[in-house]
Structure formats: C-alpha cells, structure tokens
Image (cartoon, rainbow, N blue to C red):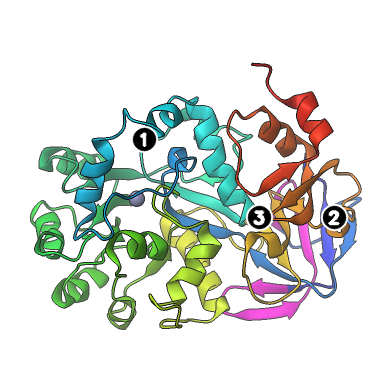
C-alpha cells in the first residue's frame, strides 16, 4: 500500500534540465500538488530525485540467458538470429527455455526495476503476467509489433501494422546490420506502407543518410541499444544524423542475450566508442530528458514528476546516474522498492529485507523480496538475507 508522503529537502529534476529544491508530494501512488492528509514527511536533503527511467526496448522473457554469439562480428543480426535459432535445443538454451514463463518475465522486470527503469516497452507477445499488479515494472500495454523484415513475412508485418491504431506505437527491429540488406530495409518497410507517425524503429544501425533524413521527420522515434549493437555488429547508429534531422531518440536495453547489463549500462555504452573513449555524450540531464520524453511519446500516461504523474522516482546522492548499486532509492507508485539501508529506514511503515546488490548493502520491500525468493531463477549480483530466502523459497 502506498502511504501519503512528502519528500522534503531534495533537489528535484523536472523536465528540460530544471533541477531545484522543492517538496514532492505523493498520494495514492500519484504526484500531487499538496501534501496528503497525515502524510509522512521524509527528509532527503543532499539527494537529487529523478523521474524513473523508461526503457524503450526489451524482450522481458529473455533476460536469464547468457550473452551469446557464435562469430566475432556479424554483418547483420539476421545471421545471429539464425545462429541462435539453430541451437535452441542445445544447452544451455534448452534448459533455460524450460523455466516457467512467469519466472523468466519476472527476472526481466526485476532487472529493470533495479536500475530504475520502471516503465518498459516489451518487444514480443504481451504475456499476461507482464500486466499483473505485482509485476515489478509497468509494461507498455497498448503496442503493436513485428519482429523484423527477416523473421516476419511481409504479410504479417503489414497485417500487424494495419491492426495497430494510429495513436498506438508500433515497433520493429530495422537495419540491425552494416551490410547492403540492412541499408535497404527502411525503403522496404516504407514500400510496405509501414512507416508512419506511430512507427518506432529499433536499432537502425545500417540506415543510409538519405533514409535517416526521411525517417526522422516521419516516425515516432529510433530506439538505440548501444551495447547490443557493439557486441554483434561493432557499430552503432548515426545518432548525430538523427538528432540533426530532428528525430527523436529513445534508449533501450534490449535483453541480456545480447546486451551488457541494464539501461544504465546502455547509457554508459552510448557514450563510449570501441576503445573506451567518449564519442557522443549528451549531459546526464539529456539522458533523463530523452528517457522522460520517451514516456510522453511512447506511452500517453503521465510519467515524470508533475502533478497527476505516477510517483515513480529515483534518488541519488550525486547528480549523476552511474550504476544500479549507486541508486540510493527506487520508488514505484509512491512505494519504496529498494534503497540504501539508511534511506529505506526513513520510510518507517515499510517492512524491508536486507540485501546486497553488486556488493552494496541495500534493503528491499518485503513484498518484492518474497517474489524474488519464490522465483525459480536468480538475478545475478543480487543476494537476499539467507534466512528470509530459506523461509520463502518455493519448495521443489
Ligand atoms: Zn530486440
């Protein structure tokens, strides 16, 4: 249950790079203009509060797989897809695919929650468990999708696009390669009549300059997944060309089958080239801004920290977001989910369980901790109190 809360003393990040000290009120899971009746006041002086992040691309049921490839570098992710498909009945894929879908999806949700990405655009069928109240993050409910021009037939792509209302986002992997096939995909998609205001392109690494200039003014945006693109293709899309052409960029984590970590790791990945040098670095605020704007464009619900929005937010000691272990607090719908022990202790009404996240002491909301214990899969880097785990683990 969410209790009326007023956060006092923190610097609050608002849209458009405005950071200032003000009170943040929350009643029944939403940001409100005034304090709620009997609100708990929590002093967070010295912390900066950001709206929770939006992950624009993930495959939530695939995050328990190891990062996988069978060649050093692919010219096109289609080849990677064929390589993986051919081995699905071999280990470790065979065993990992046999885990319950609910548990597989839970690990994907948990990965996102831990890094503060509390709204996620899922690319794959809309599994029922993703929309249950106790799923760790909010999953975009209204969306259309096709896999790609290689793994979906033209008929299926056109049917899916036409079945998606024009105000609902429609996602497709596009130009995930550096070869001629990737370079031609945008024109193929356009010829199918599937390039419109609700189209969201994922990857776009191999798009030509002319196609970027054309697409940027039409589609809803391009989702960038830097660690995946570098891992498979040793390349990233031309971000400057997108921005110069007036296009919208979203940041996506993709699944751990190809990605290195979570959405915060993508942020770091976005800014480094192959040799670890910084090559493209909007400010941290710019990243939050990109992520925040994604919420307005991908989903039309209220996300952010304005009145009426979900009270989904993160607190950090620094004004930089670096890694999930450095987040001092992650709050969903006004309810703290995980945080530093001293910060969690300020919410005295919340029962929390001791944990270690990447070696850093944390406390986790007991309801989330129970779900973690009951899940048959484990999240790497997260350890919970052993007595608690023993008590709540599913009996095999
Ligand atoms: Zn993908």
Query: In the picture, which quadrant includes the N terminus?
Result: top right
Residue 179: x, y in percent? 14, 64
Q: Residues within 10 Å of mark 2 (few under 14, many from 20)?
A: some
> Along the horizontal axis of the image, is 87 left or right of 370?
left
Q: Find disc 3 in the rendering and name its residue.
A: 312
Q: CA separation, marks 3 and 1?
A: 25 Å
Q: Tag 2 or tag 3, which sits nearer the N-term?
A: 3
Helix, strand or loop for the magenta stretch, by majority: strand
Q: Tag 1 or tag 2, which sits nearer the N-term?
A: 1
Mark drawn on residue 125: 1
Q: Find disc 2 in the rendering and name its residue.
A: 341
Secondary structure at badge 3 equals: loop
Mark drawn on residue 89: none
Marks 3 & 2, CB-CB < 8 Å contact: no
Total of numbered circles in the picture?
Answer: 3
Residue 337 seen in this snapshot: no
Whether residue 222 is situated above or below residue 391 in the rendered picture: below
> Along the horizontal axis of the image, is 119 left or right of 273?
right
In this view, the residue in front, 91 or 237, is: 91
Whether residue 352 is situated above or below residue 48 in the rendered picture: above
Secondary structure at badge 2 equals: helix
> Along the horizontal axis of the image, is 349 left or right of 291?
right
Q: Tag 1 or tag 3, which sits nearer the N-term?
A: 1
Viewer-nearest of discs 3 and 1: 1
Q: Which residues are magenta?
A: 12-31
Q: Residue at x 55, y 43 (%)?
A: 109
């Amino acid at each position: 249950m969410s209790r009326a809360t007023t956060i006092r003393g923190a610097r609050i990040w608002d849209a458009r790079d405005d950071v200032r000290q003000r009170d943040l009120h929350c009643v029944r899971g939403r940001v409100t203009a005034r304090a709620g009746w009997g609100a708990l006041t929590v002093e967070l002086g010295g912390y900066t509060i950001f709206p929770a992040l939006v992950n624009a691309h993930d495959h939530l049921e695939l995050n328990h797989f190891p990062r996988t490839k069978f060649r050093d570098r692919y010219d096109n992710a289609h080849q990677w897809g064929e390589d993986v498909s051919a081995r699905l009945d071999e280990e470790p894929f065979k065993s990992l695919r046999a885990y319950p879908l609910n548990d597989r999806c839970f690990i994907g949700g948990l990965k996102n929650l831990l890094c503060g990405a509390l709204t996620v655009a899922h690319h794959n069928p809309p599994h029922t468990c993703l929309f249950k109240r106790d799923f760790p993050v909010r999953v975009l409910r209204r969306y259309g999708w096709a896999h790609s021009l290689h793994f979906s037939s033209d008929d299926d792509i056109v049917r899916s696009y036409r079945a998606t209302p024009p105000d609902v986002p429609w996602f497709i992997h596009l130009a995930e390669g550096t070869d001629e096939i990737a370079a031609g995909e945008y024109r193929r998609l356009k010829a199918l009549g599937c390039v419109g205001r609700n189209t969201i392109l994922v990857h776009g690494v191999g798009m030509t300059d002319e196609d970027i200039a054309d697409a940027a003014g039409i589609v809803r945006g391009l989702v960038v997944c830097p660690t995946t693109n570098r891992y498979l293709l040793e390349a990233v899309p031309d971000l400057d060309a997108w921005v110069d052409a007036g296009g919208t960029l979203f940041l996506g984590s993709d699944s751990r089958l190809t990605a290195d970590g979570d959405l915060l790791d993508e942020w770091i990945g976005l800014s480094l080239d192959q040799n670890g040098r910084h090559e493209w670095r909007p400010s941290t605020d710019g990243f939050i801004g990109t992520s925040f704007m994604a919420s307005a464009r991908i989903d039309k619900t209220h996300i952010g920290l304005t009145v009426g929005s979900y009270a989904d937010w993160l607190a950090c000691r620094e004004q930089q977001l670096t890694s999930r272990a450095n987040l001092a607090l992650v709050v969903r719908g006004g309810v703290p989910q995980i945080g530093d022990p001293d910060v969690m202790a300020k919410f005295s009404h919340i029962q929390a369980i001791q944990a270690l996240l990447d070696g850093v002491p944390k406390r986790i909301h007991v309801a989330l901790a129970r779900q973690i214990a009951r899940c048959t899969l484990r999240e790497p880097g997260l350890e919970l109190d052993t007595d608690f785990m023993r008590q709540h683990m599913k009996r095999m």
